[in-house]
Amino acid sequence: MDERNSPGKKNRYIFGVTLVASVGGFLFGFDLVIIAGALPFLETDFHLSPAMKGAAVSSAILGAIAGPLFGLWFADRLGRRKTMMIAAFFFLVSTIGTAVAGSIWDFNIWRFVGGLGIGLAMMSSPIYIAELSPPHKRGVLVNVNQLSNVIGINLAVIVSYFFSFDGWGWRWMFASQAVPVLFLMVGLMLIPESPRWLASKGRMEEALAILKKVNVAKMAGQELSNIQKALGSANGGFKELMRPGIRNALIVGIILMIFSQINGVNMMLLYAPSILAEAGVSVGSNAILSSIPVYVFIFICTVAAFGLIKRFSRRSLLIASVCGMAVAHLLMAFILHRHWPPIATLIPMLLGTGSFTLGLAPLSWVIISEIFPNRIRGKALAIVCFFLYLSSFITAQFFPVLTHWFTEQYNDPAGVYILFALICTACVIFSWKMIPETKGLSLEDIASLWADKPVNKESHSSAFV
């Protein structure tokens, strides 16, 4: 067998390409969580109120809201790869700006710029990976983006602890992001464009050449033929998003990603050192150190998720994940209300973040990267990601304020976690009723499934189970 066409060679190629594309996920995790370690020091240096703390965290998310609006044009006109390049540039500018910021307002502006990069990267990276992946590997490969995200989260915590000293420590936390940013910039020069985007632009020979690198020649030709048929049956405009079946896919994608942000577990990640500090662990490096088990645990769970995604259906894993998150929030509320020792808060944090990482975190991205037809995937993902980051911004902005209010009114923040438990319960019902099963289907087959079998009560038991 020709070494160039061997399965091992193809697997190494697609994994290498996926690894580069997933650096966007790494930077997403690193950029959003590095603030968790820096927040106690920012609070001291800039005398932050609860609302200002929320703004320091959510400024990047606010930028991420705008990112998909720009990415909508970039991803369709310039391509997935060039969109990731633009995201890398925004990351670099943000890295420099946040490290030298002279006031909290300067800091928030540069965090906003980084958020633009997050919005672009987290819209284009999953699309790129999904469009390049063979159907039987798509779930696992898209989860590489989530694994990269979690690695970024863990390294952000380690970097935060290493630089957790007064003075310039928090500045070095943000400056350290330059290393993965430069890696992403170099890597993007070496990987190809998405074959489905190339096909949508009529560049069939280039698309076929790339498909042959990830599939045997016969399968590559058949896949290109399916892509051409799918492209020929759709106009790719915004009007197509309003077609009955596709409209259902868009609504499901939007609601799923909103749930992925407002479930409360993300707040455990973003505010882990602050939550532990408020529970009684002293601020600064001790709180950062105490939160490390949470971040290490989610890394372990992310690795475990590869096997679970491969073995179980999307829907069953998703529902089990959210149930675990609801239980974790109720447990956190009980511990805080009963004023148990601060270290006890690690138990629900581990349960909640572990459940989130095993199911909802990776599967939300896998599902939304699969459910839209090729011609409108960029537009649909832009709209979905807009709502994702809008809900994430609202949650991050008001979490500290809401926690402060419950503490002032009832002398503990337990009510916040009861609210999150109710949200998770609603997510379980939604996942059971509305999420289709897409495991093992090609992107073109999934698009046809939506068009032919709209999500409703009658078709749920057949096409969507």
Image (cartoon, rainbow, N blue to C red):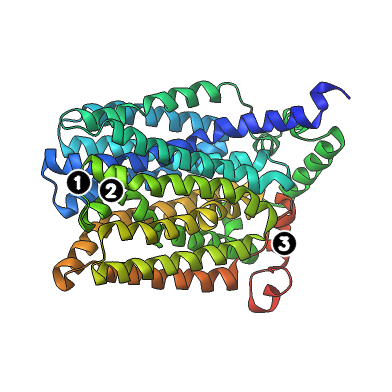
Q: Measuring 57% from the left and 55% from the top, which residue is drawn there?
A: 363
Q: Secondary structure at mark 3?
A: helix
Q: Measuring 83% from the left and 39% from the top, which residue is drawn there?
A: 219
User: Which quarter shows the N terminus?
Assistant: top right
Q: Measuring 32% from the left and 43% from the top, which residue is drawn there?
A: 60
The Cα–Cα distance between marks 2 and 3, rounded to whole angstroms, is 45 Å
Q: Earlier in the sequence, mark 2 or mark 3?
A: 2
| Residue 130 placement (x, y as % from top left) | 64, 43
Q: Nearer the viewer, residue 200 or 183?
A: 183
| Residue 156 placement (x, y as % from top left) | 37, 37
Dot 3 crowding, Cα within 10 Å, few <14, some 14–19, many 20+: many
Mark 1 lies on residue: 283
Dot 1 crowding, Cα within 10 Å, few <14, some 14–19, many 20+: some
In the drawing, does residue 250 fall left or right of residue 169?
Answer: right
In the drawing, does residue 231 fall left or right of residue 114?
Answer: right
The Cα–Cα distance between marks 1 and 2, rounded to whole angstroms, is 8 Å
Q: Measuring 73% from the left and 65% from the top, which residue is drawn there?
A: 452
